[in-house]
Amino acid sequence: MPFKTKTLKNTSILFTFFLASLGAVNAQQTKVDGVAVVIGENIVLDSDIEKFKQEVEVRSEGKVTISNCEMLEELMQQKLLAHHAVVDSVVVSQSDIDGKVQRSIDYFTNQYGSEEKVIEAYGFNDIDDLRKELGRVQKENLLIEKEQQKITETIDVTPEEVRVYFKGLKDKNELPEIPAEVEIAQIVLKAEPAKEENDRIINKLNEIKKQVENGASFKLKAIINSDDPSVAKNGGSMGVITKETGFVKEFKEAAFSLEEGEISEPFKSPFGYHIVLLNKIRGNGRDVSHILMQPEIADDKLKETKEAAEKVVKEIKEGKLTFEEAVKKYSEDDETKNNGGLIINPYTQETTFELTRMPPDLFARISELKKGDLSDIFYDETREGEKMYKVIFVKDKTETHTADLVKDYVRMQQFALAKKKEEEVEKWSKDKIQETYIKLGNDYKKCTFKKDWKKSNK
C-alpha cells in the first residue's frame, strides 16, 4: 500500500469492502455463520470479518495486517452509516446503482479476462445473478457515501490548514509516497461496415422474422444465426427485463413496444442489429428473446481505417495540427471527442491513472513513453464488436516521489480535507452509537474498540 496515514488508507476501504462482500455472500451460502454484531437492522457475520480481513491483506500486498476486532470495528462503522442513511431517508437512484454496477463488471472483466471467468471466480450462476448482488452491494455503498456527504457537506480546509497538515506528516516522517501517474488522451478512428453489409444483415433478420411468424422456432433460429456469445446456453432468451435493467436504451425501447408473441422490426444498438420476441408480460417486466447479428467488416476497410490513422499521426508529428485539434477534427469516440481526447479513469472519475494500476494492455503501450509522446497506432475492438484503430498521447506524466507541498498541493489539499471530514464523521459516530441498537456477539465482547460499541452490553 503506497500511503502511510490512516486517512489515506481509509479512502480505499469501501472498495475493499465491496470486493470482499461478493465472496462473503457465497461463504454465507456454504456454512451456517455466527452473528458478530447487529447494528440497527444490519448484520455482520463471522465469515464477513474473515473475508474482509483477507481482502485487505491481499490488496495491500501483505503490507497491512488487521485483527478480527479491528476489522469488525471498520465494518460496524460502515453499517452504522448505512443504517442512518435509511433513517435519514437518503435516496439513491437506480441509474446511479446501474452505472456503478456496470463499472464494477468492467473492472472485474478486465481483471479476470471475461464475464464468464468473473462469474466462476465469485461463484454466481450467471451474469444476472452477479448483477443482482452487485446492485445490492453498490446500493449500500451509495447510501454510505451519501450519508458521509451529508455529515461533511459544510467541511472545508484553508491553505493554512493544508500547510499545518503537511508539516505534521513531515515532522512525523509520514509523508505519503505519490505513485507514478499519467494523464492520457486518444484519437479513435472506427472501421464501419459497408452499407451493403448492413443491408444484408437487415434483410436476413427480416427473413428470420417472417419465418418465425410462419411457424419456425425462434430458439432454433437464434442458435443457428445469433452472434450473441451466450446463445448456445439460452437459445436467445434474455429472461425477464425491466425498464431499470442495465440493457441498452434501444433494446428496452423495442422490448416494451411489443405485444405478447410479437417480434420487433430489425433495430440497431451498439452491439449490432437485433430482432426481439416478447414471450410474456410479467408485471412490470418483459420476458424476451433476441437474435443479434453483427455486420462483418472487410479487410480492405480495416486497412483503409489504419491508413487514415497513420495520416492523422503524420499531420500531428509534422506540426500541422496539435493533438487536441486532431481529436476535434478526426476522432470518432463520443466519450472523449469533446474533451481533447482525455480518457477518464473509470474507477476514480479523474483524468489521471496510477501507472501500475492501469489495465495491463494499456500499461504495456504507454509505460515507456514520456510526456508529449505518441504511442504506436494499434487495433482495438469493444465487447460490442466495434473495430477501430487508436493512438494514445501522453499529456502528462509524473514519477513516483515523496509528497511535496508545492508540486502536490492539490493532492495534499485533498488529503487534508479527507482527514478533516474523517474527524467529523468520527464525532458523528460517537453520538449516533448512543442512540442506535447495537448487539455484539459473545466472541467479540472482549475486543478493545476505539469507540463505545459495547454500550448496549454494559
Image: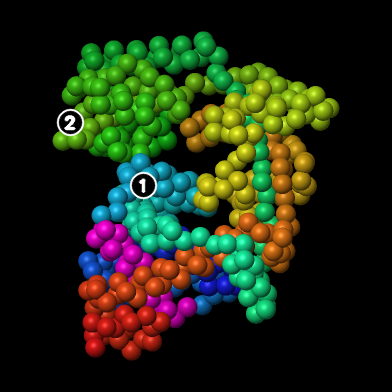
Residue appearing at x 41%, y 75% in the figure: 71
Residue numbers of the magenta segment: 66-88
Q: Nearer the viewer, residue 77 or 32?
A: 77
Query: What is the chief secondary structure element of the magenta stretch?
Result: helix
Can you see residue 42? yes
**Is 77 in the magenta?**
yes
Can you see residue 141? no
Q: Residue furthest left?
A: 283
N-terminal of the pair, mark 2 or mark 1, is 1
User: On the rendered structure, is 450 left or right of 412?
Assistant: left
Query: Dot 1, how many residues are within 10 Å of its Cα: few (below 14), some (14-19), or many (20+)?
Result: many
Residue appearing at x 54%, y 62% in the figure: 157
Q: Which residue is mark 1?
A: 97
Residue appearing at x 78%, y 47% in the figure: 370
Q: Nearer the viewer, residue 120 or 8?
A: 8
Q: Which residue is mark 2?
A: 281
Picture quadrant where residue 430 is located = bottom left
User: On the rendered structure, is 304 left or right of 429?
Assistant: right
Which percent across, then down, holds residue 112? 51, 52
**Which quadrant: the C terminus?**
bottom left
Which percent across, then down, holds residue 340? 64, 33
- Give above or below for 316 relative to 60: above
Instruction: Name the amino acid type tagged 2.
Output: Ile
Residue appearing at x 28%, y 34% in the figure: 243
User: On the rendered structure, is 366 left or right of 260?
Assistant: right
**Is 13 in the magenta?**
no
Query: Dot 2, how many residues are within 10 Å of its Cα: few (below 14), some (14-19), or many (20+)?
Result: some
Instruction: Name the amino acid type tagged 1.
Output: Ile
